[in-house]
Amino acid sequence: MTASVVFFYAFAALAVVSALGMVLNLRNTVASAMSLVVTMVALAGIYVLLEAHIVAVFQIMVYAGAIIVLFLFVVMLLNLRTDAFSPGRQKLVKLAATLIAFVVLAELLRVLTTGLPEAQPLPEGYGGYAQVGVALYTDYVLLVEVSGLLLLAAIVGALILAKRDIG
Amino acid sequence: MVPLEHVIGLSAILFAIGILGVVVRRNLIVILMSIELMLNATNLAFVGFNRMWPVFGGEPSLDGQVFVLMVITVAAAEVAVGLGIVIALFRNRDSVDVEEASLLKW
């Protein structure tokens, strides 16, 4: 068992535990967001182990740096430090929800992890900035342009939705 | 060498946890976070499968990693619009409980 395998299992355990902490923390929304940060950072570590360095950098920058900060900002803005809702959802619904999640998990594991081939050897420079950059600006240049348009639409949409008086 | 079946298995586990969060929780912000978790699970599967087949047709192929960058872009846009909706809902209903926003419910 090499060091990278040990690191992978450590990061995987951290990701699962903090994801469960995010979902099952019923008291504090800020704590949920902080648990999600831990999940994101653990996933970035796994991306490094899988030779996806640029994806790991973007994971930290965009998810841990921008998206979670946005979540925390909204939680603070709306002053939602406690998560106390009136009881309303029945135990039966929760049980059914858990059952749905387990069925999906079993099915995903069955479909995705059976009959996987061995990983092929890595070509030279795999996952480096140069190769990803060349792929983004040759084969996927249209996709890059469209995502720029999408971000513009999201900025305008978010502004209009969160504005105080519409019209 | 990281065991790739376990990478895909981890992605499935994180996706199921995300589903659990979306269905069980009533706090709209935590539901959005769970959706982010599900997007991250699919990202992990993309990266794992790309590591499994790094060469396609004799050429090095980074399609999986490029898709992950696009998914991150879409996730950022989704969070911006989603939190805008949360703020608008809070302004109208004074709550982020999804049970409060049931006007369109059949």
Image: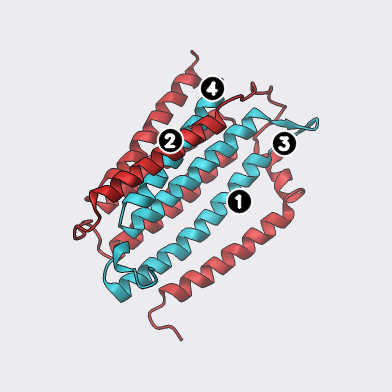
Question: How many neighbours does mark 1 have within 10 angstroms: few (below 14), some (14-19), or many (20 or more)?
Answer: some
Amino acid on which the number 3 mark rests in the picture: Ser
Q: Which residue is mark 4?
A: B3
Instruction: Indicate which disc, 4 or 1, sits on the residue closer to the N terminus.
Output: 4
Query: How far apart, in angstroms, are the residues tagged by discs 1 and 2?
Result: 20 Å
Callout 2: 10 Å neighbours few (<14), some, many (20+)? many
- Residue for badge 3: B61
Reading the chain from its start, which is encountered first: label 3 or label 1? Answer: 3
| Above or below: residue A13 compared with residue B20 | above
Relative side of B36 to B21, left or right: right
Q: Which residue is mark 1?
A: B70
Q: Which residue is mark 2?
A: A42
In the depicted structure, whether residue A141 falls above or below residue A126: below
On the image, the x and y values in percent for residue B79 come to: 46, 59
Which of the chains bears the disc numbered 1? B
Q: Amino acid at mark 1?
A: Met
Tag 4: amino acid: Pro
Please check whether the numbered discs 4 and 1 fall on a single chain.
Answer: yes
Chain depicted in cyan = B
- Judged from the image, the secondary structure of the residue bearing numbered disc 4 is loop
What is the quadrant of the N terminus of chain B in the image? top right
Q: Nearer the viewer, mark 4 or mark 1?
A: 4
Instruction: Please state which of residues B98 and A148 is positioned toward the viewer in this rendering.
Output: B98
| Left or right for A58, reference A25 | right
| Residue A111 seen by the camera | yes
Q: Nearer the viewer, mark 2 or mark 4?
A: 4
The residue type indicated by label 2 comes to: Ala
Left or right: A159 as drawn, with respect to A153: left
Percent position of residue A50, x then y: 57, 30
Q: Position of residue B22 (x, y in %)?
A: 38, 51
Q: Chain of mark 4?
A: B
Q: Residue at x 45, y 40 (%)?
A: A104
